[in-house]
Amino acid sequence: MRMDGRQLRRYCEAKLADLAIPSPFDLDAFCAALGRERDRPVVLVPIALPGRAPCGMWAVTDDADYIFVQKQTSPLHQALIGLHEVSHLLFGHTGSGQAEERTDPVFAPNLDPETVRYMLRRTHYSAVAERQAEMLASLILAEVGTWAPAEPAGPLPPEVDELVERLEASLAHGGTQRRV
């Protein structure tokens, strides 16, 4: 589906109108509210990612959606990254379902593909999906004006802690051969 700039903005503004956005804005609270609304947890996970890795990811497991956000950046950038990934979730961007969209060994060699159903990255979805996610994230930030830094509400489940450790290890030790 092709969209010009005006169509894209109208499409994203319609999505924004359907959202309950906390004020002052708190990304973790927003994710928690989305999880309650969807009857499926949406968990914010700050993570240390190297420069060659994406600054955010959305990972889907059988039990929850995890929004990974670069923790080594400014609060504003964390909010934009997190909202970009959440926007993919809100729009239902799931890719084509091909095997390479799952946790492939080139990108994350230490991740168990049985744990993560799929993990979207910029190299695996269309430019339209990227434009939609970025536009909606920007519109949400423009709407809220202020925000709180990305912080988890409480301790993460052990399996998520393990997933974070594996992601950090995979990405820190050359798990990515290309910029994604």
Image (spheres, rainbow, N blue to C red):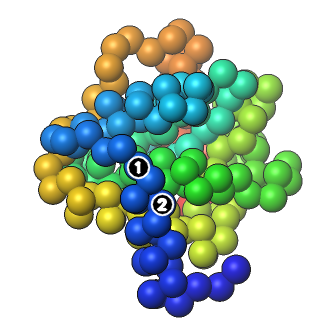
Is label 1 in contact with label 2 (beta carbons under 8 Å)? Answer: yes
Q: Which residue is mark 1?
A: 19
Residue at 49% across, 54% down: 87
Task: Name the image quarter holding residue 63.
Answer: top right
Q: Is residue 170 above or below residue 115?
A: below
Residue at 73% across, 57% down: 95
Where is residue 98 drawn, in percent x and y? 85, 53
Say which amino acid is labelled 1.
Leu
**Left or right of residue 73: residue 177:** right
Q: Which residue is mark 2?
A: 15
- Residue 113 makes an appearance in the image: yes
Q: Is residue 172 above or below residue 137?
A: above
Where is residue 76 drawn, in percent x and y? 21, 52
The secondary structure type at the circle numbered 1 is: loop
Say which amino acid is labelled 2.
Lys
Where is residue 136 drawn, in percent x and y? 42, 63
Foreground residue, 129 or 9? 9
Q: Which quadrant of the figure contains the N terminus?
A: bottom right
